[in-house]
Image (tube, rainbow, N blue to C red):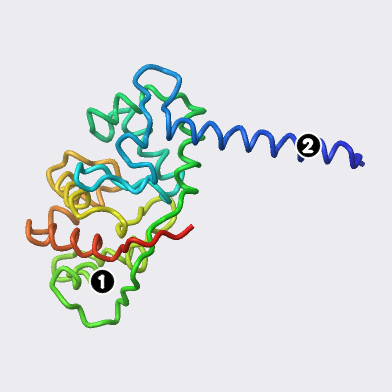
Amino acid sequence: MMSLDRVLMGSALLLMLGSAHALEGKKVFAEGGVQPGAAACMACHGADGLGLAAAGFPRLAGLPAAYLRKQLDDFRSGARSSPVMQSLAKALTEEEIAAVTQTLAAMPTPAVATAHRSATPGSPAEKLALQGAWDRQIPACVSCHGPSGVGVGEAFPPLAGQSAAYLAGQLNAWQSGARHNDPNDLMGHIAKSLTAEEVQGVATYFASLSGQEVKP
């Protein structure tokens, strides 16, 4: 039977390793990685990780670590295109990626207004977001991204809390084929079925659900 001393020593070691991991993640976020080109995340995504809407930089705070890891891996491989992020992701070490994605996932997130699917939509964009357009084989956004677009699991990121400019930009990228790093091209199919007005409307709708208050 393992002695109490060994159990306590093992627990203490795990706590130390966890603390070191968290410190490394915070360092990468605030100062960047050890290799040239591994810039600090906060330089573009803000000190709170909530993004810089005017510049088109998205919120990273509160996104699942596995989702963030996949995006960084896709940037590194070229599966997702971005001149800035591709070079930055390649400059990060495996340990830095693991640490910073955990740090970002643990950061406070914006409060999101409740949007009920049963409510009468106030606009065509809200109807698309909450109910879809099944005559065009467009599912409701919330059917995958969760109530009010808060995100579901590791595959479906939050929509609420992102800026309208970023959301519209990603929908346009899916639409044009510039972005294609999802399974079975689900988002490509949906985006290609939307008009330019619908893209902007849905993006504006989800951006409007996030207030200034931040939840820990």
Where does the image place residue 128, in percent across and percent down from the top left?
19, 68
Disc 2 from disc 1: Cα separation:
49 Å
Looking at the image, residue 118 sits to the left or right of residue 134; the answer is right
Q: Are marks 2 and 1 in contact (CB under 8 Å)?
A: no
- Residue situated in front as seen by the camera: 95 or 185: 95
Where does the image place residue 109, in percent across and percent down from the top left?
41, 55
Q: Is residue 42 above or below residue 34?
A: below
Residue at numbered disc 1: 130
Looking at the image, residue 55 sits to the left or right of residue 43; the answer is left
Which residue lies at the image location 17% right of the left edge and 54% below the top edge? Answer: 191
Quadrant assignment for the N terminus:
top right
Q: Amino acid at mark 1?
A: Leu
Neighbours of disc 2 within 10 Å: few (<14), some (14-19), many (20+): few
Where does the image place residue 118, in percent across and percent down from the top left?
29, 81
Residue at numbered disc 2: 10
- Residue situated in front as seen by the camera: 188 or 6: 6
Which residue lies at the image location 34% right of the left edge and 42% below the top edge? Answer: 46
